[in-house]
Amino acid sequence: MTTLAAETPVRHAPPALFAVTVFTSAALVFLVQPMVAKLVLPLLGGSSSVWNTSMAFFQIALLAGYAYAHALQRIASVRNQALVHCAALAIAALVLPLRVHELAGPPSSEHPNLWLLSVLTLSIGAPFAVLSATAPLVQAWHARTIGATEGKEPYVLYAASNLGSLIALLAYPLIVEPAFTLVGQRYGWSGGYGLFVLLIASLGFAVSRARSVAVEQKSAPVGAPTSWRDRAIWVLLAAIPSSLMLGVTTYITTDVASAPFLWVLPLALYLGTFIIAFQEKPAIPPDLTLTFQAAAMAACAVLLPFRSTFFGLQLFIHLAAFFLTALMCHQRLVARRPEPGRLTEFYLCLSIGGVVGGGFNAFVAPLIFQDVWEYQIILALSCFARPWGNLNRIPTWIWAMFVLGVIGAVGAPIAVTFAGPRLTTQSVVGAFDQSELFDMGMKTLLVMAVISAFMVRGRALMFFAIVAILSYASEITADRTDTRQSRRSFFGVLKISETFIPNIGGKVRMLAHGTTLHGAQAQDPKYRCQPMVYYAPRTPIGQVFRAKEAQSQALRIGAVGLGTGSVAAYVRPGDRLTFFEIDPLVVSISTDPKLFSYTTECAKGPVDYVIGDARLTVAKQPAGSFDILLIDAFSSDAVPAHLLTVEAVRGYLTKLKPDGILILHLSNRNLDLMGPAQAVARKAGGWALAQEFRPKKDPHGSWESPEDAVIVAKTHEALAGFMATGQWKRADPFKARPWTDDYTNLAGSLYSNLRGRWNWLP
C-alpha cells in the first residue's frame, strides 16, 4: 500500500489555500475581540477590567477551540474532519448577527465578572471557539498531506495565523472603528464569518479530494512521547506572556482610557512575538532577545512605581519589557516544540497556559491582592525563563556584581525608612537642599542595582533576586505618601492616604483611584465640611453650586461619580442629592464616617445612592428632575467615553428642569476632552459655556485643583448669569467632531493634548 501511494501522482490542495484559510480565521478572531469588548464597555462603566475579563474569556474560548481541534484528530479521515468542522461552524452561526445578548439580563455591579462572562458566552462564545480551532486544525491537515509527502513543517502556518491576527488588530482602531458605526461593524463581521465558512469548506473539499493514499492513511511523524514535565513547561512558558499582556494593558489604560486603540498595543506586540518566534529564520535571534530583555526588565522594575515619570518613557519601557519577555518565552517554546504529529497537543498546552495567565490576572489577583501586584510579581518570575548557567562555576566578578546589586537595591528603601522622615527642606548644601541630595542618592543606588542586574543576566537565579528586591525597593522609594488603606474591586484600586496642609488645619485625608485624586477632606473640625480640590467654591463646579443656591432654597442635585462625596457639603436643608455610582466599594468608603464624613456629617439634606452604570441609571430618572446634574465619572483618568456622547448628553438634558445646569467635569492629564464635549453639547441640542480654571496662588486659600469644565443648559437664558461673571466663555463646537455611541476618537484627543503641550507638533 505504501509503495502504491508513493507511485500514485499526488494532487494536493494549493499550499496558498492553507495560508489564506488560517490567515482569514485569525483575522476574524482578533477583529471581533475589541469589537465585542467595545459593545459591552458602556454597560460596565468603561473600566479597564472589562478588557481584562474579556481577554480571559477569549483565552478560555480559544482553549475550547484548541481542545475541539485536538479531539477531531481521533477521526482518521480528513474528509470527515472537514465535514464535522463545517457543521460546527454552521451551528455556531445561529447566534449571529453579532450583538450583546439579552438573556444575561441587565449589568450587575455586584457580580460584574460573572455577568460579563455570561454575556460573552451567549453573544460570541460558540463562533469564537469554533473559529479559533481553525489554525491548529488546518496545520494538522497540512501535516497529513503536504507535510507527510514533501516533508514541509506546518508550524510556519502559525506565523501566517498570527500575521492575520496582527493585521486585524491594527486595522480595528485605525480603519474599522473610525470608518464604520458599531451597527456596520456587527453586520460586517457576521458577513465575514459566512464567507469564511465557504472558504474552509473549499479547503476541506480540496484536501479530501487529493489523489494520494497518504492523504487518508499516512500520518505525520509523532516522535517520542511527551512527558508531563514537557507539558508543564509549555503551559508555564505560555502563561507568563499572557499574564504580562493583561498586566501591561491595565497599566496603560488606567492612566489614559479604556479603549480599543490602547487595548490593541500589548495584544499586537504579543502576536508579533509569535510571528517572530515561529519564523524559520527569526528576525530577532534568541541570544539578542535575552540581552535586550535583561536591560528592559531591570529598567521596567525600577521605573514602574514612579508614576510621575514622563508617560511616553514609561510607555516605551513597559511595552519593551513586555515584548521582549514574551518573545523570550515564545522562542523557548519553539525550541521545545514536538514533532508535527503532536502539533495539536502542543497548541492545546499553549492555550491552557494562556488561560492560566489571563485567568490569574482577571479572576484570582483581584481576590488575593489589594493592589495591582500581579504585574510586578509575574514580571519578576519571568526571570526563571532565562538561562540558568552553570551554578557550580560562577566567576568572582559575577559574585561581586550580584553583591553590589543587592546592596543598591536594599540600600534605597533602608535610607528612605530611616533617613527620609528626618530630612528637612530648609537647609541648603551647596546648590542643592538635603531633600534633592537624598533623592539623587536614592536614584544612584537604584541605577547601580539596574546595572548589576544586567551584568548577571546569564544566571537566572541571581538576576531574579536583584529584580525582585529592586521592584520592592522602588515601590518603597517612590511612595512618599502616607497610605493608610488600599482596597480593590472589579473597577480598580482605591487608596486612602493622608498629607499635611497647614492652612486648612493640618492633616488632610485623600482618596485616590490609580494616580488620580478623587477627593480630599480636612480632619480639623473647623475645615471638615469645606469642599476641596475639584469641588472648592472658586472652581467651576463650586461656581455653579453657589449660583444655583442663590436662585433657589430647594435644589434637586444629581452627581455621576461619588469619590469622597465632596459635593454633599453643598447640600442645605431642603436640598436633595442623588449619587450615581457604579462601584459599591466607593459607596462603602465614602459613607464610612471613620474615613470621610461629607455625606454623613456635612450634608444637611437627604443623600441617596443609585448603584450601576450611570448611563443606564440616570435614564430611569423622571424627566425634568434636576436643577444640577454633575457628570464626574473618571477612574484614574480613564474616560468612560460612552458618558460623553451626543446620545448621552441628549438624555441628560431631558432630566434637567427648564433652567437646570449640566456640568461636565473634563479634567484629564492625557486627553483633550474639551473640544469633543463642546461639539457634543451643540449636537445634542444644548447651549454651552466652557472654562479652563487655573487656581491663583493663595497661601490662605483652600486646596483648589486646576479644572476643565463645560456647562450645558436647555436654553440660552439659563446660562446668562454665568456668562455675565466673565469666568465662562462661549463654547466652540467646531474644535472637534462630536462623539456618538457609534463614533469616539480617543486617539485624536490624546494627540490634541500632546499638541497643546508640544507646539512643534502639526
Image: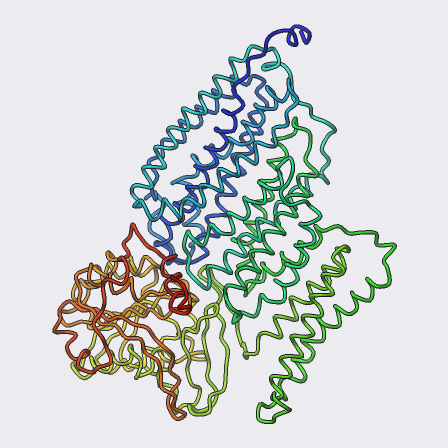
Q: Is residue 428 visible?
A: yes
Q: Is residue 587 visible?
A: no
In the rendering, at what x and y percent does residue 545 appear? 25, 79
| Colour theme | rainbow
Q: Is residue 490 left or right of residue 352?
A: left
In the rendering, at what x and y percent does residue 744 appear? 32, 54
In this picture, is 129 found above or below 651?
above
Task: Tell me the quadrant of the picture where the N terminus can be found.
Answer: top right
For the residue pair 153 and 571, the one nearer the viewer reads as: 153
In this picture, is 521 found above or below 686?
below
For the point 56% across and 23% down, the residue is: 141
Task: Tell me the quadrant of the picture where the C terminus can be found.
Answer: bottom left
In this picture, is 698 found above or below 260?
below
In this picture, is 443 found above or below 649?
below
Quadrant of the image occupied by residue 699: bottom left
In the rendering, at what x and y percent does residue 628 appear? 23, 72
For the point 64% across and 27% down, the residue is: 153
Quadrant of the image occupied by residue 484: bottom right
Q: Is residue 294 left or right of residue 245?
A: right
